[in-house]
């Protein structure tokens, strides 16, 4: 598995475009973008670097312990390969596939 990058997030968004597996397709259902470390089970809300919740998947707000590379500007370039994008609703993490299925029902 490759590190999570903005390019990978973009590819996921293109793959799931028009479904409940992207923020625009599930926000009204109470889903919030998040990441889960599949190695540790830890879930991280998607946030801006300021800590404010982000309305889409954003790597910059993830904690240093999962960051593996930064751009010269300091922005996050990549995070651990064990980080998966998904969503949180009512305290539960949903993978993109699970969120898409929940919205489709």
Image (cartoon, rainbow, N blue to C red):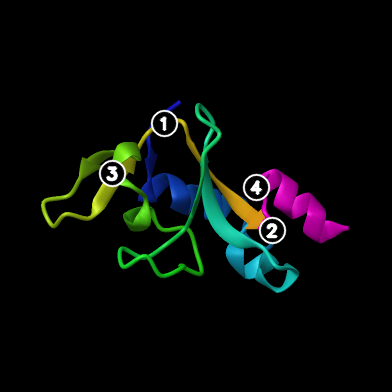
The range drawn in magenta is 89-105
x, y percentage for residue 80? Answer: 37, 34
Of the image marks 4 and 1, the number of the one nearer the N terminus = 1
Q: Which residue is mark 1?
A: 81
x, y percentage for residue 86? Answer: 59, 49
Camera-near label (1 vs 2) is: 2
In the visual, does 28 lie left or right of 102? left
Camera-near label (4 vs 1) is: 4
**Marks 3/2: CA distance?**
25 Å
The residue lying at 28 percent from left, 44 percent from top is 64
Q: Which residue is mark 3?
A: 64
**Marks 4/1: CA distance?**
18 Å
Q: Badge 3, how many Cα within 10 Å: few under 14, some, many 20+?
A: few
Q: Is residue 87 magenta?
A: no
Q: Badge 1, how many Cα within 10 Å: few under 14, some, many 20+?
A: some
The residue lying at 52 percent from left, 39 percent from top is 42
**Marks 1/3: CA distance?**
14 Å
Does residue 30 lie above or below 80 as drawn?
below
Pointers 4 and 2 in contact (C-beta within 8 Å): no
Pointers 1 and 3 in contact (C-beta within 8 Å): no
**Marks 4/2: CA distance?**
7 Å
**Marks 1/2: CA distance?**
23 Å
Q: Which residue is mark 4?
A: 93
- On-image quarter of the C terminus: bottom right
Camera-near label (1 vs 3) is: 3
Of the image marks 3 and 2, the number of the one nearer the N terminus = 3
- On-image quarter of the N terminus: top left
């Amino acid at each position: 598995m490759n590190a999570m990058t903005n390019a990978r997030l973009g590819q996921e968004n293109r793959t799931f475009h028009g479904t409940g597996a992207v923020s625009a397709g599930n926000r009204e259902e109470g889903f919030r973008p998040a990441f889960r470390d599949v190695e540790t089970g830890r879930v991280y809300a998607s946030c801006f670097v300021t800590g404010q919740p982000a309305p889409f998947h954003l790597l910059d707000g993830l904690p240093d312990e999962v960051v593996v590379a930064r751009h010269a500007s300091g922005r996050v370039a990549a995070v651990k390969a064990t980080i998966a994008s998904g969503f949180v609703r009512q305290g539960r993490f949903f993978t993109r596939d699970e969120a898409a299925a929940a919205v489709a029902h």
